Amino acid sequence: AGEIWSARSEVDGGTGGANLTVDGSGAGVSADYTITSTTVTRSAPAGFGGVTYSNLTGGSLLVKVGAGANVMTVNSTAPGITTTINTNAGLDTINVPNSAALQGANVFNGGGDDDTFNVTGLPNATASLTLNGDAHVAGDTLNFTGAATKTITGVGSANIAAAQAYITDITPVERRAKSLGMVGAAFGLGFIL
């Protein structure tokens, strides 16, 4: 069992950087977390005062939450680190209201059950965003708003819907029908073989 910090904590990686893990995976309740490039906070349930962090360069931020319908809102992430979210079991939602505010490598893992990823915009050129749906019952939901390029692992189980969503995002309107037709033909040929 880990410690529960009811007061806000501060972590400074100093000149060598650091790895920071915020572990709420032991909680079997729904939680609402917000992540920024300098903070991890939880609005509900009470009992966690949050963490302010700095100088993790070369290291990582790992946020793990427990079973339950968790809501993770990622407003921004820090440069020079890998930010990873593991939501575990439950009908979780990961919101990225402005992916242009993401920096460094970002890996958001939905965990078990049916999860929802809401992503607005496109990460900047120095950032990456990987969304992993993991195991699910009926299927994970991926909602992109605005121009988006993405790496999808597990979301939609690599089916035709995921391929069509990707083609729709990257293809100009005037070439979209032809491109979607080619995807359909490729899947049809795959079933025949």
Image: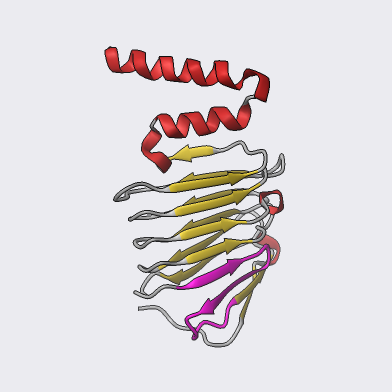
Q: Nearer the viewer, residue 44 or 18?
A: 44
Q: Quadrant of the C terminus?
A: top left
Q: Along the horizontal axis of the image, is 162 left or right of 147? A: left
Looking at the image, which residue is at 37% across and 48% down?
Answer: 134
Residue at 52%, 34% (x, y): give it: 165
Magenta segment: 31-50
In which quarter of the view is residue 43 placed?
bottom right
Question: Can the viewer see residue 79?
Answer: yes
Residue 16 falls in which quadrant of the image? bottom right
Q: For this rendering, which residue is in front, 76 or 113?
A: 113
Instruction: Judge whether residue 180 is colored magenta.
Output: no
Across and down, in percent, residue 115 comes to: 41, 54
What residue appears at the point 65 percent right and 64 percent down from the top-left corner? 36
Compared to residue 59, the image places residue 121 above or below, namely above
Quarter of the image for the N terminus: give it.
bottom left
- Relative height, residue 52 to residue 119 (above, below): below
In which quadrant of the rendered view does residue 15 lie?
bottom right
